[in-house]
Amino acid sequence: MDLKLTDKLALVTGSTAGIGHAIATALAREGARVIITGRAKAAVDETAAKLQTVSGTKAYGYAGDLSTAAAADELARLYPDVDILVNNLGIFEPKPFEEIPDEDWLRFFNVNVLSGVRLARLYLAAMKRRDWGRIIFISSESAVQIPAEMIHYGMTKTAQLAVARGLAEATAGTGITVNSILPGPTKSRGVGDFVDALAKAEGKSFEEFETAFFEKVRPTSLIKRFATTDEVASLVAYIASPLASATTGAALRADGGVIKSAF
């Protein structure tokens, strides 16, 4: 299927690895020009070079801390004409509620929510002038089913849903769509490393840990496994495309059925 993304300029935050990298790759393979972002310049440059080689389309890079307003402003000055904004940047950390200090609540909100808010604010005016744009927030099933082991993370994912819906309302009647994607447990680099460490600590293989995880921690999963990053990315690529012009204001699930709801 041709998603009609040729020459669209896409910015994917947090895209040197994991879900962000898979999204950038999917968009590039559909002909989009992609901006790779991350904190480390070496990783950004390497990822952009490889993506350009694999996809044959132009890939750019920006290294900086997009949890800061200064980095967001600089990025928007360097690349002012973004058509597709994918707010994927995010952090997670299991921690008992009683042990989460104010500083962690603020840090998670700044990275997971405000980074996307700032970029959406910076790019929205140009999208309105062109009467076309895509703003996508990579949220999580944790936005709906707040995990007891990381309530501060779940809070930020819920906040993303509210921002996305509000922006969709604010752009009603335009060629701009705003949506959220809710991945379930996904074997991204960060999650994979975390799970591998836990499995080793318990003397289990990854496969044994995965089976136990979906029996005890996420028993409502219908696929009974971690999703792949590519499975999430394919949905994002479609939602970013002109083919998805009737989909806006939605919270779309790529959660493997973890959320136990028909709606």
Image (cartoon, helix red, strand yellow):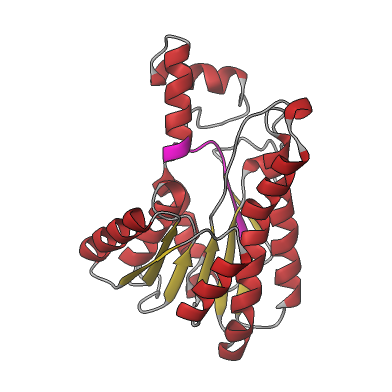
Q: Residue furthest bottom?
A: 129
- Please state if 1 lies on the left or on the right of 222 as rendered: left
User: Residue at point 34% right, 66% down?
Assistant: 28
Is 57 above or below relative to 263?
below
Q: Is residue 7 magenta?
A: no
In x, y percent, where is residue 200? Answer: 42, 15
Q: Is residue 186 magenta?
A: yes
Q: Which residues are magenta?
A: 179-190
In x, y percent, where is residue 231? Answer: 43, 47
Q: Nearer the viewer, residue 165 or 78?
A: 78
In x, y percent, where is residue 151? Answer: 73, 35
Task: Quadrant for residue 53, please give it.
Answer: bottom left
**Residue 7 in sight from this viewpoint:** yes
- Quadrant for the N terminus in the image: bottom left
Task: Quadrant for residue 133, please give it.
Answer: bottom right
Is 127 above or below relative to 44?
below
Is 129 above or below relative to 202?
below
In x, y percent, where is residue 171? Answer: 70, 78
User: Residue at point 50% right, 67% down?
Assistant: 240
Task: Quadrant for residue 216, please give it.
Answer: top right
**Residue 247 in sight from this viewpoint:** no
